[in-house]
């Protein structure tokens, strides 16, 4: 049984079919990539899996449990955590505090605990702080911990979103174009981070435009175009697939030529 | 249990009030469509219309028509002042939505207090435009003012439609409401258009206030309920077209009048607000659709 | 660790500001205590409004939601206290607590459906709430005595010991406000408070991290209602008189002025704002109507020119250090 099983997933916006009858199986522990041209429906696909959009039809099962139409926070609580293409950092909070918020699911305690501050709560707060700094070091933002999050350069904001998502201890991590806005060096660092995350037995689905990056690090790749999944396979298979070359890699290479 | 005639009578009364709510609702829509702002102080214009007209009638002894026209012009000027002094500076600084709403509430309080200081806090009213009446149809009595409200309401709505569809300025205002950036690129002076929308909306509110005052009363404090009821009418109408707002207002007025028969006059606003909550919760796009997409 | 070290590492520049402020407030209290008279009442009311604002700050400051109808909950507190003590002879403290419970339940009933709304809808729905309450308090004369309101409401006290003396009243109110601020501070610097602040910035981001947005909004709304109700009760027991006007639109505008003057979203801001804004009319020596006009004008000016409140002028370096080194 795959960790994520998507069947017949379809989303219509008025006349436009953004996702059409998509099937996908993502095995536990894999590093999966979804590629496709602009407007292919990749973000829409993520939005439905993570509960931010209701599918028009189709089902989504996570770890054997139906999560179709479940609320976002319940899905996140099951271990399916996402980042956003348009970064959604918490303004007015420091970089470290952003990651501390990420620890929400991994911690407990509400109003009562906050008022009384029993020993376990104080320990937990200290752990949260330590964990935040550890994760920031992990993505290379340790130095900026005290800075206001939304003042970071764009590329670092994306890294911070990754660190924040990791704080939620995900089983499946959805990354929506994490490399957008990163320079070549930063992209290398990011690739390394993603692979290290994956080695900690966190399943990753990655949306990415950088085909070189994807074919290098992903185990399997699905290709979307006009809302349909046109193919799926290993990086080698994808690179050789004629429809992919025509629909995506072709235009990509033409653009670079 | 009220009998059928009593109910019918109060529904007819509700029609007049409802049309006035509709006019206020159109005022809300004019500003909202031009600027994306809901002016919570809309009721102030209604209150000022009635208060100014009363003052001009009783203290200066002007004839009704003159008092009405002068009041409308004065209130339109107040509307422009509010836009220029409060809304525009916040708008330019990209103030958050709720700060602008709060500012319009503060404007409402400010104007209320100034009215108390200058005109006093006592409720007042003036006679209907046409004396005599009411028209008797069996046990049902219809005050002549209702016909004034119907007539003036119809004239204003038609005039507004002509203005928006036939005149250059009206079309420019509509262009602003559809897409401000594009309108600016086309050389439409967006800032003046916003000012115009406040003037227009204030004038509409004032006219509504002048029309309704003879059937009830006016005082510094009527702005809150009128504003809210106009907003509810706008929501029922879906914040779209003027006729929809008018229908929304009429619906509200009639339902409210029916409710007064059952619960007593004191609770008419409570009933209206309950309707508001029901509409907000179950018909978030208004009964005729529209608003949801614009937000 | 020396006191100086604690101040500089824990609070930074903000620490010095806070201390300067504490000294200023202490001096103010000392002066008012010495002078007595009318200023005592002003400061008492400042403490009461402070309680209201600290609560409102949970919903508007921390959580970033708009409510223009918190006066409804203050009215529940005020009338609850008045009715229970005057009509039924309850102990003031008990009346205050029971009224708070009623306000809390009302907040759940009202908040559960309305908090699904956003933007103008939420604003209007909450504003409507305040107006409904006002209308009911005017119309339901059997319960509220209409425009006349209630007078002769007994002061707070426990058993035979009642707080009659104006200076003692002020001290009690100050202690209550301090307690309110303490609760606010504890909650802000916790998992709960972080969730609220995350929601205020982006609900999408918060939900993606497993924060149950609607529930946290409701909790913040309830907390704000509890504070508002407490403030309403305190007003009733301190002044001894309430009427519908006490909880009208003025209250909305006055409390927002305080929130903005002090700094929305900060821990101390609402309390400080309440004190400053209460003294403002005394400074310009205006009364009655002019006072409301002054508040409205100040609020509008602040909204235009200092939208984040005066605290932004003093917030340099207020970040809480979280480097491991600062702990040792
Ligand atoms: N909420 C929405 N309402 C209407 N249309 C939408 C909505 N969200 C997405 N779309 C449309 O659906 C299509 C797919 O969009 P989507 O954002 O999923 O593409 P994408 O593959 O992520 O593109 P990109 O690479 O640019 O991020 C687009 O045509 C987009 O305009
Ligand atoms: Mg996308």
Image: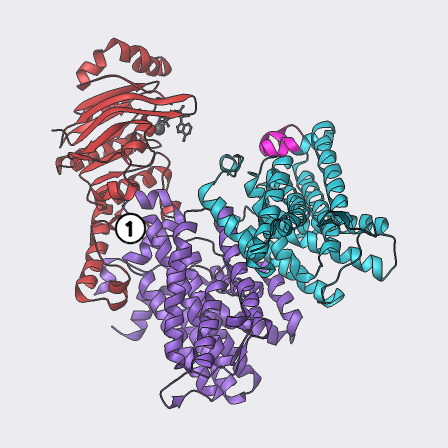
Residue B164: x %, y % from top left: 69, 32
Which of the chains is cyan? Answer: B
- Residue C90 horizontal side relative to residue B161, left or right: left
Res B170 visible: yes
Q: Residue at x 17, y 37 (%)?
A: A197
Q: Residue at x 23, y 66 (%)?
A: A117
Image: A150 above or below B115: above
Which residue is tagged 1? A101
- Residue A27 horizontal side relative to residue A67, left or right: left
Q: Chain of mark 1?
A: A
Residue B202: x %, y % from top left: 70, 47
Q: Indicate yes or no whether the magenta region holds residue B179.
A: yes
Which stretch did the figure color magenta? B174-187
Please name the color used to draw chain C.
Answer: purple
Q: Is mark 1 within 8 Å of ligand 2?
A: no
Our reading of the magenta stretch's main secondary structure is: helix
| Within-10-Å neighbours for mark 1: few <14, some 14–19, many 20+ | many
Q: Indicate yes or no whether the magenta region holds residue A53.
A: no
Image-quadrant location for residue B219:
bottom right
Residue B150: x %, y % from top left: 73, 42
Please name the color used to draw chain A.
Answer: red
Q: Secondary structure at mark 1?
A: helix
Nearer to the camera, A170 or A137: A170
Counting the numbered discs, the total is 1
Image-quadrant location for residue A89:
top left
Nearer to the camera, C12 or A19: A19
Q: Quadrant of the N terminus of chain A?
A: top left
Res C317 visible: no
Q: Which quadrant of the picture is home to ligand 1?
A: top left
């Amino acid at each position: 049984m795959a960790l994520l099983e998507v069947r017949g997933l379809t989303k219509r916006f008025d006349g436009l079919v953004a996702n059409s009858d998509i099937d996908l199986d993502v095995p536990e522990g894999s590093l999966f990539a979804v590629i496709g041209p602009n407007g292919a429906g990749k973000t829409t696909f993520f939005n439905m899996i993570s509960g931010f959009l209701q599918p028009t039809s189709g089902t989504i099962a996570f770890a054997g449990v139906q999560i179709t139409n479940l609320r976002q926070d319940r899905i996140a609580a099951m271990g399916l955590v996402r980042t956003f293409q348009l970064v959604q950092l918490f303004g007015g909070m420091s970089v470290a505090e952003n990651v501390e918020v990420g620890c929400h699911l991994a911690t407990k305690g509400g109003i009562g605990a906050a008022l009384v501050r029993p020993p376990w709560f104080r320990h937990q707060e200290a752990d949260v702080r330590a964990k935040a700094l550890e994760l920031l070091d992990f993505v290379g933002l340790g130095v900026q911990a005290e800075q206001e999050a939304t003042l970071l350069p764009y590329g670092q904001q994306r890294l911070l979103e990754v660190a924040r998502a990791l704080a939620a201890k995900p089983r499946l991590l959805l990354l929506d174009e994490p490399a957008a806005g990163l320079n070549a060096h930063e992209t290398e660092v990011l690739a390394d981070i993603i692979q290290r995350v994956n080695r900690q037995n966190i399943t990753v689905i990655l949306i990415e435009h950088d085909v070189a990056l994807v074919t290098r690090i992903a185990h399997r790749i699905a290709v979307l175009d006009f809302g349909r999944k046109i193919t799926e396979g290993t990086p080698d298979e994808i690179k050789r697939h004629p429809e992919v070359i025509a629909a995506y890699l072709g235009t990509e290479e033409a653009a670079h030529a | 249990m009220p009998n059928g005639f009593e109910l019918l009578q109060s529904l007819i009364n509700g029609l007049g009030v409802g049309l006035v709510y509709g006019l206020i609702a159109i005022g809300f829509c004019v500003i909202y469509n031009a600027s994306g702002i809901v002016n919570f102080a809309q009721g102030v214009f209604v209150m000022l219309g009635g208060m100014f007209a009363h003052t001009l009638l009783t203290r200066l002894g002007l004839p009704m028509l003159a008092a009405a026209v002068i009041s409308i012009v004065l209130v339109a000027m107040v509307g422009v002042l509010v836009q220029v002094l409060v809304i525009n500076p916040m708008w330019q600084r990209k103030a958050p939505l709720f700060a602008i709403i709060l500012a319009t509430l503060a404007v409402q309080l400010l104007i209320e207090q100034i009215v108390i200081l200058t005109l006093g806090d006592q409720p007042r009213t003036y006679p209907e435009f046409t004396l005599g009446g009411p028209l008797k149809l069996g046990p049902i009595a219809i005050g002549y003012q209702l016909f004034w409200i119907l007539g003036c309401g119809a004239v204003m709505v038609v005039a507004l439609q002509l203005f928006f569809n036939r005149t250059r300025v009206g079309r420019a205002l509509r262009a602003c409401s559809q897409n401000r950036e594009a309108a600016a690129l086309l050389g439409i002076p967006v800032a003046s258009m916003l000012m115009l929308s406040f003037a227009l909306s204030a004038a509409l509110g004032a006219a509504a206030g002048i029309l309704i005052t003879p059937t009830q009363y006016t005082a510094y404090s009527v702005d809150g309920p009128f504003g809210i009821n106009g907003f509810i009418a706008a929501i029922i109408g879906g914040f779209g077209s003027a006729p929809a707002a008018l229908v929304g207002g009429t619906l509200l007025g009639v339902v409210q009048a029916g409710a007064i028969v059952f619960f007593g006059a004191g609770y008419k606003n409570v009933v209206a607000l309950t309707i508001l909550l029901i509409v907000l919760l179950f018909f978030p796009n208004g009964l005729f659709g529209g608003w949801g997409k614009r937000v | 660790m020396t006191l100086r070290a604690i101040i500089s590492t824990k609070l930074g520049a903000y620490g010095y500001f806070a201390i300067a402020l504490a000294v200023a407030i202490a001096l103010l209290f000392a002066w008012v205590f010495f002078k007595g008279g009318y200023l005592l009442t002003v400061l008492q009311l400042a403490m009461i409004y402070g309680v209201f604002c600290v609560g409102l700050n949970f919903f508007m400051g921390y959580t970033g939601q708009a409510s223009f109808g918190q006066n409804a909950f203050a009215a529940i507190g005020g009338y609850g206290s008045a009715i229970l003590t005057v009509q039924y002879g309850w102990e003031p403290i008990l009346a205050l607590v029971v009224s708070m419970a009623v306000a809390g339940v009302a907040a759940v009933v009202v908040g559960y459906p309305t908090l699904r709304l956003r933007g103008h809808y939420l604003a209007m729905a909450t504003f409507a709430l305040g107006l409904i309450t006002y209308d009911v308090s005017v119309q339901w004369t059997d319960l509220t005595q209409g425009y006349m309101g209630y007078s002769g409401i007994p002061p707070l006290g426990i058993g035979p010991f009642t707080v009659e003396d104006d200076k003692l009243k002020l001290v009690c109110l100050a202690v209550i406000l301090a307690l309110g601020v303490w609760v606010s501070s504890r909650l802000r610097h916790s998992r709960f408070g972080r969730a609220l602040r995350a929601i205020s910035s982006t609900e999408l981001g918060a939900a993606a991290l497993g924060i149950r947005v609607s529930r946290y909004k409701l909790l913040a709304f309830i907390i704000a209602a509890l504070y508002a109700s407490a403030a309403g009760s305190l007003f009733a027991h301190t002044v001894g008189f309430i009427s519908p006007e006490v909880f009208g639109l003025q209250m909305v505008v006055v409390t927002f002025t305080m929130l903005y003057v002090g700094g929305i979203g900060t821990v101390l801001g609402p309390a400080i704002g309440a004190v400053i804004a209460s003294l403002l009319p005394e400074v310009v020596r205006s009364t009655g109507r002019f006072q409301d006009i002054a508040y409205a004008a100040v609020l509008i000016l602040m909204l235009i020119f200092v939208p984040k409140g005066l605290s932004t002028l003093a917030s340099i370096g207020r970040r809480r250090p979280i480097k491991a080194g600062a702990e040792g």
